[in-house]
Image: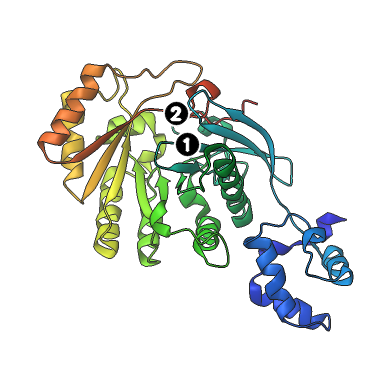
Amino acid sequence: MSELKKDIRALSREELREFFVSQGDKAFRGNQVYEWLWQKSAHDFESMTNLSKETREALDAHFVINHIKVDSMQRSSDGTIKNAVRLHDGLVVESVLIPTKTRTTACISSQVGCSLDCKFCATARLKRMRNLNPDEIYDQVVAIDKESRLYHNRPLSNIVFMGMGEPLMNYKNVLKSIEMITSDDGLGMSPKRITLSTSGVPKMIKKMADDEVKFHLAVSLHSAIDEVRTSIMPFNTTFPLKDLKESLEYWYEKTKRRITYEYVVWKGINDTQKDIDALVRFCKYVPCKVNIIEYNPIDDGDYEQASAESLNNYINSLERHRIVVNVRRSRGKDIDAACGQLANKN
């Protein structure tokens, strides 16, 4: 029967108000239900205690709440938590809570599987099964906020769209979820605490700039040489560096916000001085910072972490050219929760 019912969270506040008027009830009931759905994250109509029994039964007759369920939760020795999140149709995605001394960050998925084909990433091997709805993205944040409060005694402070999927290939739903996460009607988080990470879809980066988004942008770069980037991220043939560069210049011109480049250095792939020089040149186009990310192997071992010497060569060259560089040590490796490892193994 639930297949015939509409997911109530697909309705706007105004549509909920109109529903109640059409039922001969007061419009403000729509406001009450909207608050239960988003601010209070109600998963069933029964828990909406300021509504009459008749009203709750009417809601149950017309609608369903397709909420997520945390199927399993794994805790790493370093405090990282990985959730296997079951969706209403039985599919599963993963999301991660990453704690530090000063913050807790939610790493959120936007697709079941992924639309792209990065060879170093476990998620890419799953292929894309479907996009997540705005409420499914929102629910991951709510679940991690609860875990942050429970296990780390503080609310969630930051969100990164770096989980499963390419967020810009699910643009409309991702932006709707961020709208609700940042709205006073939802979680009321500041957009400045949200970072969207993309492999680089130039047309959609420009659209984000035109839409005047207020969150931060990160780009998984990994090489500033087209042939090298294509060898590890084959979609680079469709979205070459020239187009990516142009879209990032457009982004900065419109938003005046610097870009973060995420960059993994692999042995024998992008660990030469030529690779370093190309990255330094690319960093000169728009104000940016570089996060050098520790590589986390995925089963077959085709890719290996570069030597400490290679990493130091990158760091020294970037710093010499006054480019901000951070080295990100991976968290949650013992539970396959680190960057590039999300693959629903469990």
Q: Are marks 1 and 2 in contact (CB under 8 Å)?
A: yes
Q: In the depicted view, which residue is nearer to us: 287 or 228?
A: 287
Towards the viewer: 239 or 108: 108
Quadrant containing the N terminus in the rendered view: bottom right
Q: CA distance from mark 1 to mark 2?
A: 7 Å
Q: Place residue 42 in its image quadrant.
A: bottom right
Q: Is residue 133 above or below residue 212?
A: above
| Circle 2 SS class | loop
The mark that comes first in sequence, 1 or 2, is 1
Residue type (three-letter) at the residue carrying disc 2: Arg
State left or right for residue 319 relative to residue 193.
left
Q: Amino acid at mark 1?
A: Ile
Return the x and y of residue 117 as percentages of the image width and height: 47, 35
Mark 1 surroundings within 10 Å by alpha-carbon count, few (fewer than 14), some (14 through 19), many (20 or more): many
Query: Residue, x 82% and y 55% (percent of image)?
Result: 3
In terms of depth relative to the viewer, which is nearer, 276 or 108?
108
Residue on which the image places disc 2? 331
Label 1: which residue?
A: 98
Q: How is the image coloured?
A: rainbow
Which residue is at a point 27% across and 59% down the rendered structure image?
250
